[in-house]
Image (cartoon, grey):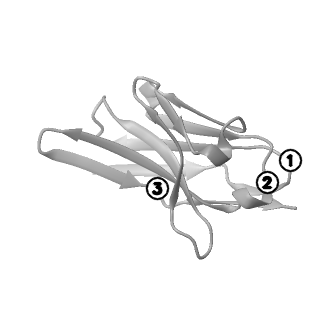
Amino acid sequence: QVHLVESGGGLVPAGGSLRLSCAASGSIFSINVMGWYRQAPGSERTLVATISSGDSTNYADSVKGRFTISRDNPKNTVYLQMNSLEAEDTAVYYCNLYWSRGAVRVNAWGQGTQVTVSS
């Protein structure tokens, strides 16, 4: 069982910044991928950024150069620094943790945190 707790969402004017955090607890294999996804009203959940336990990162084209994902492995925590926010970034942001080992596979989600960017 894996539990993810997100924090840091809120209301910010366009051009502003926010930092999201997500702390994971429970059954976590050391080799894993953590990431952030977002879902706007009426839209599907889409990738924002991911980071592996080896610090390899992947970003959606729409956030490259504005968002930075990072992690603290001993704390099992992932961060998303969001700068130059745009109204189009408004969404519920979900933290994700994925790992697999042999026949065991874990794909856990947080409860989501709302980010609202006012134009």
Q: Please indicate whether residue 105 sits to the left or right of residue 34 in the image.
A: left
Q: Please indicate whether residue 21 sits to the left or right of residue 28 in the image.
A: right
Q: Position of residue 116 (x, y in %)?
A: 74, 61
Q: Look at label 1 and name its amino acid.
A: Gly
Q: Position of residue 80 (x, y in %)?
A: 62, 40
What is the C-alpha distance between the residues marked 1 and 3?
26 Å
| Crowding at mark 1 (Cα within 10 Å: few <14, some 14-19, many 20+) | some
The residue at 50%/31% (across/down) is: 57
Camera-nearest residue between 101 and 72: 101
Q: Which residue is mark 2?
A: 86
Label at residue 15: 1
Q: Earlier in the sequence, mark 1 or mark 3?
A: 1
Label 3: state its secondary structure. loop
In this rendering, the answer to whether 116 lies above or below 57 is below
Q: Position of residue 97 (x, y in %)?
A: 39, 45
| Crowding at mark 2 (Cα within 10 Å: few <14, some 14-19, many 20+) | many
Camera-nearest residue between 46 and 97: 46
